[in-house]
Structure formats: structure tokens, C-alpha cells
Image (cartoon, helix red, strand yellow):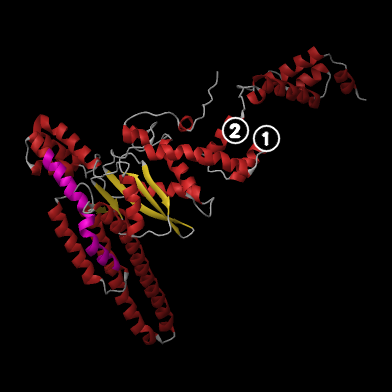
Amino acid sequence: MNSSSSVASGLQPLHRQDLAVKVLSKKEKISHLAHQEGVSRKFLYQQGNIAQLALNKAFEKEEPDHEVLYYLPVTQKWIFQLILALILICHCSYRGVIELLRDLFDYSLSIGTIHNRIKQAVQKAQKINQAQDLSPIEVALLDELFQSNRPVLTGVDAHSTYCFLLESVEHRDENTWGCHLLEAESQGLNPDYTIADAGKGIRAGQKAAWGDKPCHGDVWHILDQGETLCRNLAKKAQGAKTQREELEQKMESAKLKGQGNKLSAKLSLARKNEVILQKLASDIQILLYWLRIDILSLAGPEWSERLELMNFIIEELQFREDQAHKGIKALRTALSNQKSDLLAFAEVLDHKLRDIAQKFQISRSQVRKVCLLMKKSLSTNVYWQKWNHLYQQLSEKFLPVKEAVSEAMKSTPRASSLVENLNSRLRNYFFLRKHLNSDYLDLLRFFLNHRTFMASRKPERVGKSPTELMTGQKHPHWLELLGFELFQRA
């Protein structure tokens, strides 16, 4: 054993601490301190590391992993509401519930027991669903989705998102739709009008149940069809360009070999085809831009002018429908057949704007200008120029008129987007099940209607449920409605 090792081994703990502090302070060089104390530099570095680890540990925030936050009384009734929450909130399967209870609660449960408890909740949910008054619904959105090739009929309130219809059926024909709409009518459902896609069963069923009640067209589906057509035409135009470029490259190679004339005819045709397809894609894109921005937008001209513009779009599509793509004819046919339904929202909005003009004793054209102002972006100079111009014309009436027009536009839906949104959320539940039954759908409808929105683009919906938004009245938590008592920490 060398002398430095023997000195180091004989040092007392306090002396070691003092050396560690000197090392961490870096006031003295390690080599000078080692020579002064008669120890090795390696030993000093070791003491410094030990001290640094001790400091880190001392200043670390203590993790409350083992701290008891609160005690939870786990009873059978609490277990059963946990089962409901796992299935409805977490989209958990029955076997997933069994595994979670086994692994985290050391509690065994059978699928049969879960099924029986769910059945009890279904009976209470069905009574609540059937007792709900549907008379506040002014605009109903209707749609269909499919699960294992079996149609599911859905209906939603355009204002509150309340789901008044969710039923798995064998057929989606006139009789089926008519019967379910009449059942909803017995609960007070009597909307001013409905919005649906061009499905024949929906429209025939509504006519059979409600006679001449208007069924407006859903603008989303027709615009989506147009966007799909634009993408396909753009791909064709790009393919023609690629083909022309490849032929030009081959032409250059052939010229070097003295054989350029063999490809000249093909290249000429390729160039003509590219020009035709590029022009066609550009024309269709412009027409559909007008359709989306000028004709089917909320902020637009009067219904009669929109109809003229729609007829113009249809004529232009018909003129081009033989040019390389059958999708143009399909879109033109759809617009021709649905134009009255698609523009029905404009008549509703026109009526509301006329009422505003009468209320504030101003001209209809001034109200229309305020409506068209909504189309402009607030970040543009054009918006503020028009804003100032209208303010000078209407003076103190301008802001109240603008607010009234904005509310009129918000309360005039054009699409069944909310029911499409519901369908997308339902998919997260349906993927666990091959077959759907009325009991499960009744419970799911109850849950979706009574759970509160945690977030929404519309601030007035946050913290409220669709039922509360529809009725204007608060209600207990959905678990309390089913007879459970919510746990609260002391």
C-alpha cells in the first residue's frame, strides 16, 4: 500500500466532507490540494462525486408515488358505475373491463354479470329517452351509417346536437324511416324543416310521415363530390404532363440517332392532350370555387340570383361533361336534381334578413351588404373600408344590425355536419361490436345526450350537455340519473 492510499484510508468523515467541499468549490487546483493533503487526485475526485450526488438527492423534489392521496370506498355499486364509465367513456370491451378489475382491483367478475348490470342501466336509460320532450328542436339533421352492412338511422338537433334517433334497422326504405320519424313525433318532434343528403329512403320516409315539411339539401356532400372531381382531374392533367415530358426526352434521344421523326406525331398528340386536360381541370376548379364561395355560402346574394348562378354552373358543366371524365356528368346531374334542395337555406336566410330590415327600418340592400361583409376577412383593408362605409350609412343602427345578421346566419344551417360528426364518434363504439342491438344503442344515446362537453368551438356549449342545450335546464350527472352516487373526496 502506497503512502497516499494509507493517508486516504485514515481520514475521518468530517475531514472527507471538508475535502469534498473544497473540490466542488474549485477554489484550489486538484493537484495542489492532493499534494497538500497527501492523497491522490483520484481520491479527491471520488469525494467530490459523492458530495455532488448527496446534493442532488437533497434538492430533488420528493415524488409522492407512495403518498396516499385519498381513500376510496370500493363497494359493489361503485364497481358497477366504474364498469359503465369504462364502457361508455373509455370505449372499453367487456373483456377489457374484466382484465382491468382483475389487475388493478384484484376483483373477479364474469361477462354475464357485466351484461346483467348493463341491462339494468339500459332500462333506466330507455325511460329517460322516451320521456324527453323533443318539441324544442327546430331543425333536424337526418343521416344513415352502416355497421356490418346493416343500416343505422341517426337524427340530431342542429342547435344542441341532441340525438333523438339512433336505431339499427334491417332496411333504410320509406316505411322504416317513416315509422321512426312518427315515433319521434309522438315525443313532440315537429321541426320547421330537416336537412339530409340525397338518400331516397330518408326523403320518401319524411314525406310519408310529415307530408310537405321541407327537407333541405346537405351542401357538404355536393361540395365533397366536387372536390373529389377536382382532385381526379388534377391527377389526369399531371399524368398528361408527365407523359409529354417523357416523350420529349425520348425525342431528344431519338434525334441523336437520327430517328426523331418517329415520335413527332405522338408528341404532338400528347401536347394537345395536356393542354386540353390542364384547361379542363382549371375550368372545373374555377366553377366549383364559385359554387362554394358565391352560391352555397351563407354570405351571398339573394335566392333568385343564386339560382341563376347555379343554372350557369350546370350549363358550363354540361358543356364540358364529354371531355375525358365521367365525374363531370355525375356532378352536373346531382346539381340539376338537387339545386332546389341545396338552395333552400338561402330562402330561409332571405326571410330572416327581410325581418331585420323591417325591424330596423332600413332597406333590404343595406342588410344584404352587412351580410356580404361577413364574407370578408377582418385582416383585410377591404373589410374595414366596407365596414366604415356601412357605419356611415346606418350610423347607430349598424352594430345592432350587424349582430342581428350574424345571429341570423348562425341559426341557418346548410349542412348535416353535426350528424356526420355524431356518426364519426359512434364509429369509436361500433368497432368493438359486430352486431348492434336496441338496448346498447339506447344506452349509448342516453350517454351522448347527457355527458357534458369538455371543449367546443362554440364557447356556449362548454360544460353543458346536449340535453341542457336543448331544454335550457340543468340536470344531474348521467351516472346520478342512472341511480348511482358520485364519489367526492372529503
Dominant secondary-structure state across the stretch colored magenta: helix
Residue 364 drawn at (x, y percent) = 9, 43
Q: Depth check: 322 or 386 in front?
A: 322
Alpha-carbon neighbours of circle 2 within 10 Å: few (<14), some, or many (≥20)?
some
The residue that appears at 17% across and 62% down in the rendered structure is 311
Where is mark 1, residue-wise? 107
Q: Determine contact: label 2, label 1, CB under 8 Å.
A: yes
Q: Is residue 150 visible?
A: yes
The quadrant where residue 328 appears: bottom left
Where is mark 2, residue-wise? 79
- In the image, taking residue 451 as reference, residue 307 lies left or right, namely left
Residue 228 drawn at (x, y percent) = 35, 61
- Quadrant (top left, top right, bottom left, bottom right) of the C terminus: top right
Determine whether the residue tagged by mark 1 lies in a helix, strand or loop.
loop
Number of labelled discs?
A: 2
Q: Is residue 223 visible?
A: no
Q: Depth check: 485 or 321 in front?
A: 485
Q: Is residue 50 magenta?
A: no
Q: Which amino acid type corresponds to the residue marked 1 in the rendered image?
A: Tyr
The residue that appears at 74% across and 25% down in the rendered structure is 49
Residue 304 drawn at (x, y percent) = 12, 55
The residue that appears at 31% across and 40% down in the rendered structure is 134
Residue 59 vertical placement versus 445 (above, below): above
Residue 19 vertical placement versus 1 (above, below): above
Q: CA distance from mark 2 to mark 1?
A: 9 Å
State the extent of the magenta-drawn residues as a range: 330-355
Circle on res. 115: none
The residue that appears at 80% across and 24% down in the rendered structure is 43
The quadrant where residue 392 appears: top left
Determine whether the residue tagged by mark 2 lies in a helix, strand or loop.
helix
- In the image, taking residue 161 as reference, residue 304 lies left or right, namely left
